[in-house]
Amino acid sequence: MAEEIKPTFAIEKLYVKDVSLEVPNAPKIFLERETPKIEVQLNTAGGAFDKNLYEALLTVTVTAKINDKTMFLVEVRQAGIFRIEGVSDKDAQTVLAVTCQNILFPYAREAVSDVIIRAGFPPVLLSPVNFEALYQHQQQQAQQTKTETEKPKAKN
């Protein structure tokens, strides 16, 4: 009789995969006194790359603009290697999209703030993110898209 594998989750490695900073309007932008408009974009990805080993990736892009001038643009790609065993592929994808992203986010948040400060600007503190709600929303959109593409087209 085969022994049942108990679900296992472990962090193997957390690392910054890529960091990018642009200050296209330096040095004049440092003389601006207006409060910039801050835009934050998040992208998540993940997948298996070896037996029971997965890479999760969180990309955070922060852009600050004053009118049409870019003050700065920072992009951090925070990644981690996670061991996930004893769960279905669907459950592993949920762990990657929710649990792993929740682990990566504080590291990405710190890296973004640090890069912005080192560039000579006041820190930008990213608000907490509900990755479970984001994942559920993505799943609903994917299901809706699938349903819409499967509908038979009406004849005129």
Image: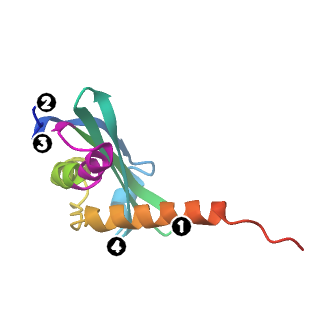
- As measured in the structure, the alpha-carbon distance from the residue carrying label 4 to the one carrying label 2 is 63 Å
Q: Quadrant of residue 89?
A: top left
Reading the chain from its start, which is encountered first: label 3 or label 2? 2
Looking at the rendering, which quadrant does residue 32 occupy? bottom left
* Earlier residue among tags 3 and 4: 3
Lower position in the chain sequence, tag 1 or tag 3: 3
Which x, y percent locates residue 75?
Answer: 35, 47
Please name which of the two marks, 4 or 2, marks the residue nearer to the observer. 2
Q: Amino acid at mark 3?
A: Phe
Marker disc for residue 9: 3
Identify the residue position indicated by label 1 in the image.
144
CA distance separating discs 3 and 4: 43 Å
Question: Is residue 104 or residue 114 the one in the foreground?
Answer: 104
Are there few (<14), some (14-19), or many (20+) residues within 10 Å of tag 2? Answer: few
Alpha carbon separation for disc pair 1 and 3:
31 Å
Tell which circle, 2 or 1, labels the residue nearer the N-terminal end: 2
Q: Nearer the viewer, residue 72 or 120?
A: 72
Of badges 3 and 4, the one in the foreground is 3
Q: Secondary structure at mark 3?
A: strand
Q: What residue range appears in magenta?
A: 81-98
Picture disc at residue 2? 2
The one of 149 and 77 positioned closer to us in this rendering: 149
Of callouts 1 and 4, the N-terminal one: 4
Vertical side of 60 occupied by 135: above or below? below
37 in magenta: no
Instruction: Determine crowd level at label 3: few under 14, some 14-19, many 20+ residues with C-alpha closer than 10 A.
Output: some
According to the picture, the residue beneath numbered tag 4 turns out to be 35
